[in-house]
Structure formats: C-alpha cells, structure tokens
Amino acid sequence: MYNIALRIKTFDWLYILIIGVVFAMLLSSLGYVLLERDWYQGAMFGALLGFSITFFSLVFITYMNHSILPKISEIFWLPLAIFFSFLSGFLGTLSSTTAAELFDIDLIPLFHTHSVQIAVAIGFLTYIVGALLYRFVKMRNEKEVVDHHYVQSRLRSLETQLNPHFLFNALNSIAELIHQDKDKAEAAILKVSTFLRNTMDEKALIPLSDEVRNVRDYVELENIRFAGLIHLHIDDPMPKINVPKFSIQLLVENAIKHGFIGRKILHISLSYDMSENKLILQNDGKAMKNTSFGTGLTNLAQRLKLLCKGSIEITNKEKPTFTLYLGDCYENTYC
C-alpha cells in the first residue's frame, strides 16, 4: 500500500495528528454524551487516543518505509501496510486506556471488560482511515512530481533560448572588432572561450560569487570593444546566496547595450538589500524610454519566477535601475 517513493513530510504528520486528535475527541465526546457521561472526560480520553494512534503510526510507518520496504518484494507491501496500520490502532488504544487510568479519566465500562476487542476494532478502523490519508498524500506527491518535471523542462527550454542569445551578441561584437583591431578581436575570442567555459555548469542556480565572477569576465570582454569605458562597481562583501545563472550578466549586458553614450564612461553598480532579499543594478547611462522587456529580460523574469518565486522590476527610468526580488528561493542560505 505505501509506495517506497512516497514522501510523508513533517507537515503531513502534523496535519494527521491534528485531524486524529480532533476526530477522536469529537467521537469520544459524542459517545460519552449518549451514555449520559461527562463529555469533558470523553474529550480528554479522545485526545489521548488520537495522539497515541498517531504516534504509533508515525513510528511504524516511518520504520516500514525506510527499513523494510526497500528490502522486500512489492507483493508484500500491502500486507505489511495493513499489519502496521492495524498495530498502530491496536497499541494506541491499549496505551491510551492505560494512560487514562493513570490520569483518573473516567472510562466507559466496556474499556475495562472488553479492552482487547475494542482495540482490535479500532485497529481495523485505523487502517481504513490510514488508507484514505495515503491516497490523499500520494495524489499530492504525484502532482508535485509532475509540477517539478514541468519546471525542469521549462527551465531547459529557457536556457536553450538563452545561450544563443549571449553568443549572437558576443559574435556581433567580435565581428565589429575584426575590421577595427585584429589583435583585440583575437583577445575577445579568447575571452568568450573563457567566459563560456566558466558558465558551462548545468545547474540553473549558481552561487552569487560565481555569477559575479562571470560578470567581471563579461565586462572585461566588452571593455576590449569599448576601450575600457565600462566601469563596474560591486558592493563587497556580497551574501552567500544562489541566483539564476546569467541573471546579473543579462542586466549588465542590457545596461551596456542601451546605456552607453559615445566616449563617456558608463558606471554600473551592483548592490544587495538583505532586508528585502533583493539585488539592485544601476547605471548612469541613457534614461530609459522603452520599459518593455526583450528576449533576455523576459527569459530572466520567467526563470526568477520558476526558480525562486521572484520577480524583476524597473525601479528607476531616469537613472536606469533594475531590481531583482529573489523571493523564497529555498537554495538561498545566509551565512
């Protein structure tokens, strides 16, 4: 019944505990009221019963999924699941009955005279409830797997689109240099080779330090064409977080493409705001007139959304400023 691939999360067990305790309290209170007994005593016993059954279920099912199922044939999974689910209800009932006596909780006489029979009945009921919860968790996990594969497929598609975008721009720059300065063109080709070698990591998220290194290499490449007129300033130290690959490089590329003015130095700065978990890239070039995103920035916006539930915004048009909101990207770890 419980597939080895099934992942039962901590929150799953928390929800099961809450549902089990509340359901047992309501059912037990109703039973006590019908038998003209104190409903409060019934609620207390129900809380003990729900907690005990959930505790034994957590121990047995976790042990079964991690230590038993991987070592046996799948044909034995269902019988074992039935056995351990039943055992959780059976032992949970006996232990809660014992605890109730220790805490002087009033018990229905049947629990004194037929405790084993009642424990068996609740054991079978536990299996039925467990089977329903299993179906729910399994469907949730299957949806997560489908969503994960969709995101990975979409990311691969975006990265396939992104790499040619960079290469086309770089090759266009080299083509211009060939007619102006062959030595600079040769140096540019070597720089492109080095840059691409540094960015061949297949991971969609890379350390910010690696992205900054790639950006520095990219600016050096562009400065061959722009005679060192691009000045890059990066706040130090930067946090130890992960960011989408090519994220900052795309913003720097955009700043150079749209902000460069003749022979004037273009200053580009990168800073980080820890309070809002955002990166800010600003330049002092041409003011922005068109705020619509092209291929590269649209690509970046989609990758930010998929990887980090983040976003990108233009926060200043006069002094072109882009802000990357990194969202709740779980790979981000502050040190």
Image (cartoon, helix red, strand yellow):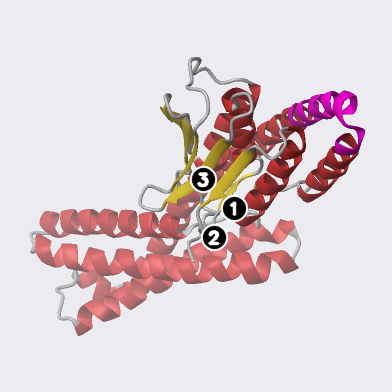
Extent of the magenta region: 165-184
Vertical arrangement, residue 108 with respect to residue 227, above or below: below
Foreground of the two, 96 or 240 = 240
**Which quadrant of the structure image shows residue 43?**
bottom left
Magenta residues: mostly which secondary structure?
A: helix
Q: Which residue is mark 1?
A: 208
Q: Amino acid at mark 2?
A: Lys
Which residue is rendered at x = 64% and y = 32% of the image?
A: 253
Observer-side mark, 2 or 3, equals 3
| SS at mark 1 in the image | helix
In the drawing, does residue 311 fall left or right of residue 42?
right
How far apart marks 1 and 3 lie (CA) works out to 12 Å
Observer-side mark, 1 or 3, equals 3
Image coords of residue 210 (percent x, y): 66, 54
Which residue is rendered at x = 18% and y = 72% of the image?
A: 107
Q: Are marks 1 and 2 in contact (CB under 8 Å)?
A: yes
Image coords of residue 74 (percent x, y): 73, 57
Residue reaching furthest to the bottom: 102
